[in-house]
Image (spheres, grey):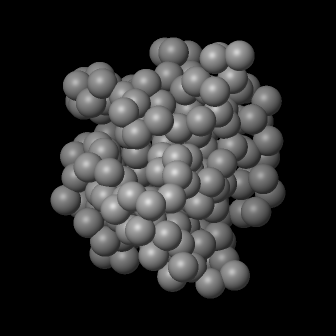
Amino acid sequence: MAEIKEKFWLDAEKAVLVIIDVQEKLAPAMNQELYGQLVLHINLLIEGFNAFNLPIIATEQYSKGLGHTVSELNGATDQHQIEKMTFSCCGEDNFVATLEKSGAKQVVIAGMESHVCVFQTVIDLMDRGYIVHLVSDAICSRFKSDYDNAIKTAARAGAVITTTEMALFQLVKGAGTDVFKVVSKLVRQRTP
């Protein structure tokens, strides 16, 4: 069943990481337990995607009012940084063009808020034919109930719900490579 593997198994030749709106003035309002988890895991995803030399796109929602991407995200602003005014990233033509230019068919999603910009982007991307992997330990909202509902509803809509380690090891596929060593070292930094 090639369709199952095509949907549920990330492929380094088809994947892009999208980091949505992790901004200075939004961060303090987030559920801080979820936010701490988000920062740790997005940094792991950035380092992992960089090890594969895979594309990363970061967005900022109305940066004039909400500030820029938080400094805790190592290197997120070194990537394609896209300003937007719509909640869904797909409402911004520059985002859509950058995503299309990447050639990716699988979109790994991280960011905030789970139930607004993240969720609306997930739905829009799937509607456009992309396979979406929503990284549950790399998203957050102000309220846990909104976070939980966003994950459940995205799953019902057809998004693949994943975690940081699950996504990174799917990209690696096996042990013994240089990229495996990098990813293995990254995930060992993570404390249970």
Q: Evaluate whether residue 166 shows in this view.
A: yes
Q: Is residue 167 left or right of residue 11?
A: right
- Measuring 38% from the left and 68% from the top, which residue is drawn there? 182
In the displayed structure, 142 sits above or below 4; it is below
- Measuring 43% from the left and 25% from the top, which residue is drawn there? 105
Q: Is residue 161 left or right of residue 112?
A: right
Q: Evaluate whether residue 27 shows in this view.
A: no
Q: Nearer the viewer, residue 75 or 48?
A: 48
- Measuring 40% from the left and 30% from the top, which residue is drawn there? 14
Q: Is residue 47 left or right of residue 10?
A: left
Give the quarter of the image for residue 9: top right
| Residue 41: x %, y % from top left | 52, 67
In the displayed structure, 167 sits above or below 133; it is below
Quadrant the N terminus occupies: top right
| Residue 180: x %, y % from top left | 44, 61
Give the quarter of the image for residue 137: bottom right
- Measuring 40% from the left and 45% from the top, which residue is drawn there? 17
| Residue 3: x %, y % from top left | 65, 17
Give the quarter of the image for residue 22: bottom left
Question: How many numbered badges does the structure rendering display?
Answer: 0
Quadrant the C terminus occupies: bottom right
Q: Nearer the viewer, residue 143 or 57?
A: 57
Q: Nearer the viewer, residue 192 or 144?
A: 192
